[in-house]
Image: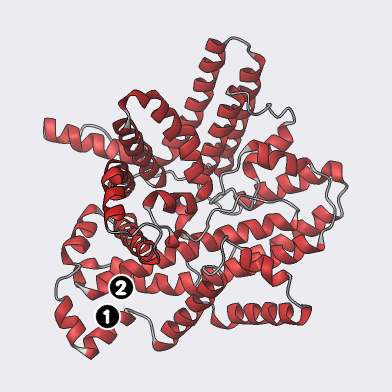
Amino acid sequence: MFFNSIEYFLFLPAIYLIFYFTPDRFRWIVLLSGSIFFYASLMHPYLLLVLFGVMLATYVFGKLIAARSEEKEKKRLFWIGTSMNLAILVGMKYLPFITENLDLLLKAIFGKSVIPICPVIVSIGVSFYVFQAISYLNDIYLEIQEPERHFGYFALYISFFPKILQGPIERANSLLPQLKKPYEFNYDNMRSGMLLFTWGLFKKVVIADRLAVLVNTVYGNVSAYTGLPLIVATYAYAIQIYMDFSGYTDMALGTARLFNINLTDNFNRPYLATSVAQFWRRWHISFSSWLQDYLFKPLQMRMRNWKSWGSVIALLITFFISGLWHGAAWTFVIWGLLHGLYMAAAVLYKPLQKKIYKKLKLNGTKILKLWKTFITFNLVSFAWIFFRAKSLGDSGWIITKLFTGLREQLGSLSVLTESLKLGLGKFDLAVIAVSLVIVMVFEFTNKANNEHLLRLQQKPIYLRWIVYYLLVMWVALFSATGSQEFVYFRF
C-alpha cells in the first residue's frame, strides 16, 4: 500500500474517520494501529520484527541514559543503544554488500570463494526510522530531550505512517508534543492537507512516472546509447527524482496535516541553489540537517585545530556515510563522495573565489547568481549518474559517451527527435512540458516551498475551487499508465 494506490485512498479516510470519532485519550491507539497496519500491508519479511526491535531498544536505552548522572555511564549507554540500532540497520541492509566485497577480497588472496554471500534482506523504511531513533538517543544524552515515558506514544513517534517509509526524519521535540495534543477539527488544515496531498500526487503520477519511462529506457540499457540520449536521460532523472521524492513528501505532509500534525518540509526549491552546500540545505532537509547536527559538526569540532582541512575531512566522511546510507553499492558511495568533494573544493577555493569575483565586479550581480545556479545544477545532475546507474560499469559508459556522436545527432532533425522521445509519445512529452511549467510557476516563483498553497488559500473562493477542480481533473486525466515505485522506497 503506497500513497499513490487505490488501497491508500480507501485506508486514509477510514483511519481518519475512526480517529475523528475516538476520544482523545485513545486516539494514539488508532494512529499506532493504523501505522502498524500500513507498514504490515507491504508484506515484506521481518518488517514488524525489525520495527519493534528498534522501538524497544531505543525506548529502553533512552530511559537508562536519562536515569544516569555520571557522564561516563551515560556515554556508554548511548553508544550501546546506538550500536544496537546500527547493527539492525547493517544486518537488514548491508550484510550482502559486506560479504560480497569481503569474498572478492579473499578470492583475490586465496583464489577461491571463502565465505557465503548473505541473501538480501531489506526492511523498507529502516534507514529512516533508525536515524530517527539515533537522534532521539543523542538528544537525551545531551539533555536536549526528556525520555518519553509512555511506550505507546514513543512507538507512534517512531512508526507514524505518513513518514515511516521515506521520512521526513523527525526530531522528538517536534513530533511527540503534536502527537499528544488534543485534536480539534481544523478546516484550514483539512483543506490545505488535501490540497498538498493532491499537489504531491500530481508531481508523482503525472510528471515523475512519465519521466521514469524515458529514464528507464536509457539507463536500463546504457550501452545502446551515446551522446544526446544519455544527456537527456540524465537531466530527465534529475527532474524525475525531485518530482518523485518531493511529491512523496508533499503527500506525507498533507496526510499528517489532516490530523493537525506538521511534519518537516523536506524541500525548498533545491535546483535554484547557487552552491552545492546550499543545495543540501534545500534538498532532503530533515536528512541533511541530521547529517549536519549529528555527524558533520561533531567531526568538525574534533578537527577544528586543522582549520580548513578539518572541515574538508569532516565533509568527506559525512558524505561517504551519506552515500552508504542511500544504498549498499559503490555507485552510491561515489555519489556521496562526489558531493563531499564538491563541498570540500568550495571550502578550499573560497578565498580565491572572493578575489576573482571582486576583481571582476561580479558580487551581487544577477549574472553571477544565474551562473552559480547553472553550475550547481549541472554538478548535481552529473552526480545523479552514479545514483541512478545500475553499476559502476554503466556509470563509466555514460560518462565516457556523454558527448560521443553529439554533433551528428544535433545535425539531423529525425535523429534529434528520436533522441528526445526515448520511449515517450508526443502526447506524453506535451503533458510533461505543460506540467513542468505549472510546477515552475507555482513552486519556483515563490520564496519558500509550499508558499504557493498559502497564497492560494488567500484568493477568492471561486478562484480557489477552480484551481482545486483543475488540479484534480489534471491528475485524473493525465496520470501515467502503470504505477511506478517511489524512487526512495528502496532506501
| Residue at point 49%, 82% (across, down) | 434
Name which quarter of the figure residue 433 lies in: bottom left
In the image, what residue type sits under mark 2? Answer: Val
Q: Nearer the viewer, residue 400 or 107?
A: 400
Count neighbours of disc 2 (C-alpha within 10 A) and say few if under 14, some if 14 to 19, many if 20 or more.
some
Count neighbours of disc 1 (C-alpha within 10 A) and say few if under 14, some if 14 to 19, many if 20 or more.
many
Query: Whole-Å distance between the Cαs marked 1 and 2?
Result: 8 Å
Of pointers 1 and 2, the one earlier in the residue sequence = 2
Q: As drawn, is 451 to the left or to the right of 307?
A: right
**Can the viewer see residue 1 in this picture?**
no
| Residue at point 68%, 35% (across, down) | 154
Q: As drawn, is 314 to the left or to the right of 193?
A: left
Kind of element beneath mark 1 = helix
Q: As drawn, is 161 to the left or to the right of 216?
A: right
In the image, what residue type sits under mark 1? Answer: Ser
Q: Nearer the viewer, residue 165 or 347?
A: 347
Is 406 located above or below residue 316 in the figure? below
Q: Nearer the viewer, residue 164 or 398?
A: 398
The residue that label 1 is drawn on is 419
Please identify the quadrant where the N terminus is shown.
Answer: bottom right
- Residue 248 is situated, as x and y percent measured from the top left of the image, at 55, 60
- Tell me, for residue 110, which label it has, or none: none
Tags 1 and 2 touching, CB below 8 Å: yes
- Residue 51 is situated, as x and y percent measured from the top left of the image, at 58, 39
| Residue at point 40%, 48% (across, down) | 277
Is 111 located above or below residue 340 in the figure? above
Kind of element beneath mark 2 = helix
Is 65 located above or below residue 299 in the figure? above
The residue that label 2 is drawn on is 232
Name which quarter of the figure residue 470 lies in: bottom right
How many numbered callouts?
2
